[in-house]
Amino acid sequence: MKFRSRITKPVSAVLCVMALAVGAGTAAAAATDRTAQSAESKYAAQAKAVGLSSRQAAQLQDRVDAQLADIKVPAEQVAYNEIRAKDGSAIITVSVPGVANTSCTYEYLCLWTGPNWTDSKVSFYQCRDYDLNDYSFNNDTLTSYKNNQTTGTVARFYNWEGRKVYKFGSTAYHTEDSLSNTPWDNMIDIVDVC
């Protein structure tokens, strides 16, 4: 009997520790789930505040989720239609039907997938090269831009042709263009912000 009880006590202790670990893991998962649900309801409330129906808000959230899944840099959703790169290098704004998205914050280079500053937008701040595919601007989708950086700052636009090939430049302050009727429409892959 004594031999048996010695084995039983350690086994009981191990089982008890395992039960506590499972309980802690379940509690952590539940807390994470509550946080995600809270963020989703916050974003749904923001979408409703700009006039979207529940169905439109859900469709927009699906588009934001798809864009987040396609982005190749660490990023997170920070508003109902906004994704931010975790290093602060870019802000991706998913287009919302009926909501204008044509502004570009001072000191940023902003790019749109649609003509005349429409559809989804990515805004860059840091001076460096950006591969647009990393920010879900896939298949050469750049169609318009605004260079709202400090006066004299030059942004350079490139296409990948087995190597980085310069196509055109844009000098700030507030240079803007729609590329719809140019040879560069849906061509640009890389942008050197400044």
Image: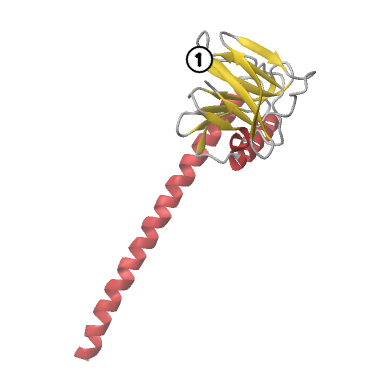
Q: Residue at x 25, y 77 (%)?
A: 10
Residue visible at 23% across and 85% down in the picture:
5
Count residues near mark 1 (Cα–Cα under 10 Å), then give few for <14, some for 14-19, many for 20+: some
Coordinates of residue 146 in the picture (x, y in percent): 62, 15
User: 121 and 46: which one is in front?
Assistant: 121
Residue 155's quadrant in the figure?
Answer: top right
* Residue 21 coordinates in the image, percent (x, y): 35, 61
Give how far across and how far down residue 149 sits, in percent: 53, 13
Residue carrying label 1:
107
Q: Is residue 32 above or below residue 187?
A: below
Could you tell me if residue 41 is visible in this image?
yes
Residue 65, picture quadrant: top right
Residue 130 rendering spot, x and y as whole percentages: 56, 31
Identify the residue at image location x=69%, y=36%.
161
Can you say whether 136 is above or below 23 in the image?
A: above
Above or below, 165 relative to 154: below
| Helix, strand or loop status at disc 1 | loop
Q: Amino acid at mark 1?
A: Glu
